[in-house]
Amino acid sequence: MAQSFQLTVKTGPNPGKIYDLVKEEVVVGRDLGNDIVISDADISRRHAHFVLQGDVYLLEDLGSTNGTYVNGERLTGPQLLMGGETIMFGSTVELTFSPVGFDVAATMIAPPHAAAPAEPVVVAPAQVEPAVVEPAEVAPVILESVPVINVLADEPALEPAVEAIPEPPAAPVVEPEPVIEIPPYNAPEPAYSAPEPVYSTPEPVISEVSVETEPPQKSKKGLWIGIGIGCFVLACLCIVGTVAVILWQSGAFG
């Protein structure tokens, strides 16, 4: 029978809640459509998923914003899970991956207690009797003279070979770049200078008002002469007209 696994919430929403892993793929995230829904700001909509391979689960991050961690190390690919390992989604949600029936509290490290001071142990020194060592009898050794043959007498002495240490390459000499002095730029004076405008105020023109002089009055004599001539002409015309009427009535014009 295959072993079942579970997730126990240690920190985050609903501490102590247990999620059983019963599917071949279990998706964890903030979205309501996931298999395990964790409503926390550090959890992405689809944060990570557990994939069953044989009798073990693999954990893989699904491109979450705040990352997935196993035993404090951020996942960069699928990670094989072992019982009792700590899983963190983001920085606030911590869970424990364990087989079903595993006592999570039993794996917690108890806080250190102040240990009672140990009583000093007094060790009495042991009495050691001095050992008496008798001198051993040593047989005399007779040394016979052995002729020494100097094999290397005729050969020149060999000097130890010294490996030549290559000298480090000399640093390249960098010649300083020539400094080019740029003279200050003086703007050339323009060959043509525009004349300054001369503003003159026109003098007011006072037009002389021509005063019409009354024509000299004609003399009354000339007036009467004109009236007389007019009357004469008018009388002549009346006479001519009368004569013409008479002649026409008399039948002179046939």
Image (cartoon, rainbow, N blue to C red):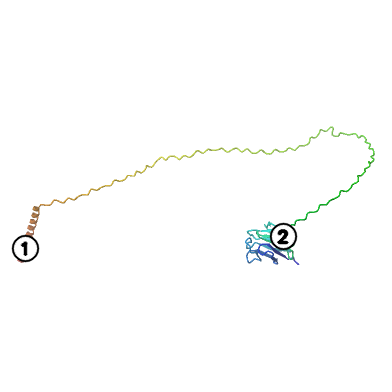
Position of residue 248 measured from the top left corner of the image (x, y, whole percent): 6, 65
Residue 244 drawn at (x, y percent): 6, 63
Residue 192, above or below 225? above
- Badge number at residue 144: none
Bin the neighbour count of mark 2 within 10 Å (Cα to Cα): few under 14, some 14-19, many 20 and up.
few
Percent coordinates x, y for residue 196 in the rendering: 37, 42
Identify whether 248 is placed above or below 141.
below
Residue type highlighted by circle 1: Thr
Residue 231 appears in view? yes
Instruction: Give the camera-side residue of 59 and 11.
Output: 11
Residue furthest out toward the left: 250
Mark 1 element type: helix
Q: Secondary structure at mark 2?
A: strand
Do the residues under discs 1 and 2 have CB atoms within 8 angstroms?
no
Q: Residue at x 8, y 58 (%)?
A: 231
* Marker disc for residue 242: 1
Which residue is denoted by mark 2 in the rendering?
A: 85
Between 18 and 183, the residue placed more toward the observer is: 18
The quarter of the image holding the N terminus is bottom right
